[in-house]
Image (tube, rainbow, N blue to C red):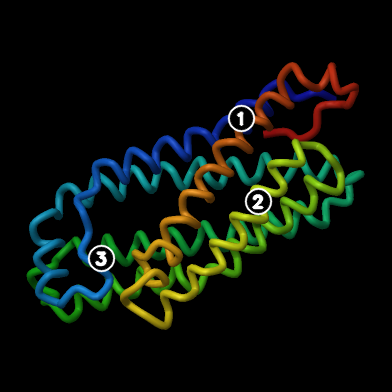
Amino acid sequence: MNDRFARYGAATGVLFVVLVVIAFLIQPTPPDSNATPAEVLGYFSDHRKALHVVLLIFGAAAFFFIWFIGTLRAALGRAEAGIGRLATTAYGGGLVSGAALLVAFGLVATAALHPAENGPEVTRALNDAAAMVLAISAPAVVVFFTANSLSILRFGYLPSWLGWLGFAAALFNALGIGAVFTDHGVFAADGVLGFFVGFVLFLLWFLLASIMLTRRLGGDEAAAGRPVPASV
């Protein structure tokens, strides 16, 4: 049975990306990953209100993230002849990744709540902990992209190029675990390979996957001659 609301669920991926981009655009420039405790304390003390707004936006983005990966799992699972092994595996990786993001946001929110009372050492420890949570969650992100890409390439529900893009996203997000071992250079939590490339590919994949899934659950089903999968 067709679910006319499914494509709304598919479009939540676009909303997730839009909110994340907005949050990063208004976020005050954070201190370097190897900044001194005094520099980190100054950042959180000077930008408390702005950080609270940014975290609220990230919280809203997390809502759409979870909704989208659920819709994606349902669609790809149906395409896998109802077995959904790869789609379910990807969904599990996505949930763990989302949980890691929420924990990291919680640590940053704690650092921004009472920075003066916490002092420089505790504030930097909270900030470092947020970065480390994201770094050690890299395997979950890799599982999400790898399993989704295998499902796309094996069963053809979404374009094959999206599957290959997912493999690239998996590779570069795997490098994020390098932040556990260093606080400076390209593999640091704010480095080119430790964060930026993987993050850009992460957002790009979500944006394109959301657009492709929304189109597929809209008018493309009839042209493809397949039933509409997935409810919201």
Residue shown at 37% from the left, 68% from the top: 189
Tell me the crowding category of disc 2: few under 14, some 14 to 19, or many 20 or more residues within 10 angstroms, Cα based: many
- Lateral position of residue 145 relative to residue 79, left or right: left
Q: Which residue is mark 2?
A: 166
C-alpha gap between disc 2 and disc 1: 15 Å
Q: Is residue 176 above or below residue 65?
A: below
Residue 179 placement (x, y as % from top left): 41, 74
Q: Is residue 207 left or right of residue 196?
A: right
Question: Is residue 221 positioned above or below 191 on the image?
Answer: above
Q: Position of residue 27 (x, y in %)?
A: 24, 48
Circles 2 and 1 in contact, beta carbons < 8 Å: no
Q: Tag 3, which secondary structure?
A: helix
Pointer 1 residue: 211
Of the residues shown, which amino acid type is indicated by label 3? Thr
- In this rendering, the answer to whether 159 lies above or below 177 is above
Residue underneath mark 3: 110
In front of the other: 159 or 82: 159
216 left or right, relative to 34: right
**Is residue 58 depicted above or below 116 in this figure?**
above
Q: Tell me which amino acid carries mark 1.
A: Ile
Mark 1 and mark 3 in contact? Answer it, CB < 8 Å. Answer: no
Of labels 3 and 2, earlier in sequence is: 3
